[in-house]
Amino acid sequence: MTIALSTWVNRVAPDVPGCPAPLIEREILEAAREFCRDARVWSEQLAAIKILTGVDRYALASLNGRILGVKRARIDDTGADLVVDLDEDGYLWLAHKPAEDSDLYLSLTDLTFNSAAGTIASAATDFADAGVEAGDEICITGTSYNNRTFTVESVATTTITVDTDEDTVTDEGAGDASATICIGGLVVWVYLQPEKTATALPDILWHDYEDAISSGARWRLLRLPGRAWSNPELAGYYQREFELGKSRGLGVTRHGRGTREARIRVNRRFVV
């Protein structure tokens, strides 16, 4: 979910009377980009990546924003965090080259989830022929609600039944779900920043950090010289509020919600 920049304008406009809405939108976006860059509060889990024997370089991409860095990387969303490098071209480097391919990698667009039966179905593939077996830990990424790991209880031609003693699937409505099902795949979480061309911001920024980002926009606007709304003294106040908000956001990232950045090694020859 996203919140349009035009909605954010209503929070800032009263403090900069006479300021054009497009200029307010621009400074809200710039404040949000700076906030995400410094506080690392916006993250997402990318779809699982198929690991290839001897390949230690994998491209990362997000449709939602610009990737700032890696939050963590794991195999199948289980076990210890991997030590990785991230270069300026958006490629992730593993510390060691894999000795074998991922056991399974399926990219599907017609998955159906049934919580009552604890099943995952797809008419587009034969799960048994693809290599899914009872007892496997399958990692699913890319869905709205089932973006996690499941233990397979049994497998039919087009249906996987999960072990509901450990976890159960969540119904995702009438629409088909697009997702990746992987065993032994590379799962990566990344920190994001809005693109310069964004017209809306992720709802986490609105619900959790609206005050701080709006303060950042006010500071950027009030410091402009020679405008009807210029106010250097008040700009200083909002700058302090913005910086305080970034510090609090970074504290949540590192110590709250169990989301601290861990075991990520950035090669000195690369710029993140």
Image (cartoon, rainbow, N blue to C red):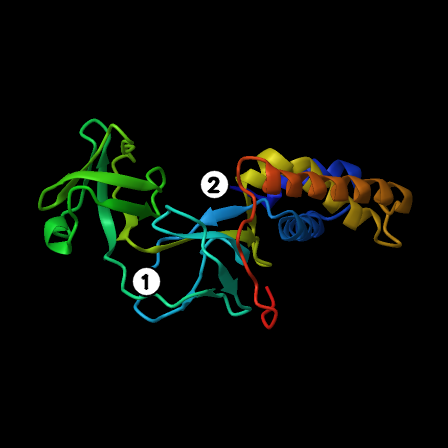
> In this figure, which residue is indicated by the disc labeled 1?
51
* Residue 234 shown left or right of residue 141 in the figure: right
> Disc 1 marks which amino acid?
Ile
x%, y% of residue 44?
47, 48
* Residue 34 shown left or right of residue 50 in the figure: right
Judge the density around disc 2: few (<14), some (14-19), many (≥20) Cα neighbours within 10 Å: few
Reply above or below: 202 against 26: above
SS at circle 1: loop
How many labels, in total?
A: 2
Residue drawn 41% across the image and 66% down it: 96
For this rendering, which residue is in front, 78 or 140?
78
Residue drawn 73% across the image and 46% down it: 217
SS at circle 2: loop
x%, y% of residue 33?
64, 52
Judge the density around disc 1: few (<14), some (14-19), many (≥20) Cα neighbours within 10 Å: many
Residue 1's tag is 2
Q: Nearer the viewer, mark 1 or mark 2?
A: 1
Residue 208's tag is none
Dot placed on the residue nearer the N-terminal end, 1 or 2: 2
x%, y% of residue 171?
27, 32
Residue drawn 38% across the image and 68% down it: 97
> Disc 2 marks which amino acid?
Met
Residue drawn 84% across the image and 44% down it: 235
Q: Is residue 268 visible?
A: yes
For this rendering, which residue is in front, 213 or 259?
259
Q: Is residue 17 visible?
A: no
Instruction: Estimate the spatial distance between the alpha carbons at disc 1 and disc 2, rounded to whole Å.
Output: 30 Å
* Residue 231 shown left or right of residue 89 in the figure: right
x%, y% of residue 202?
53, 44
* Residue 12 shown left or right of residue 195 in the figure: right
For the C terminus, the image quarter is: bottom right
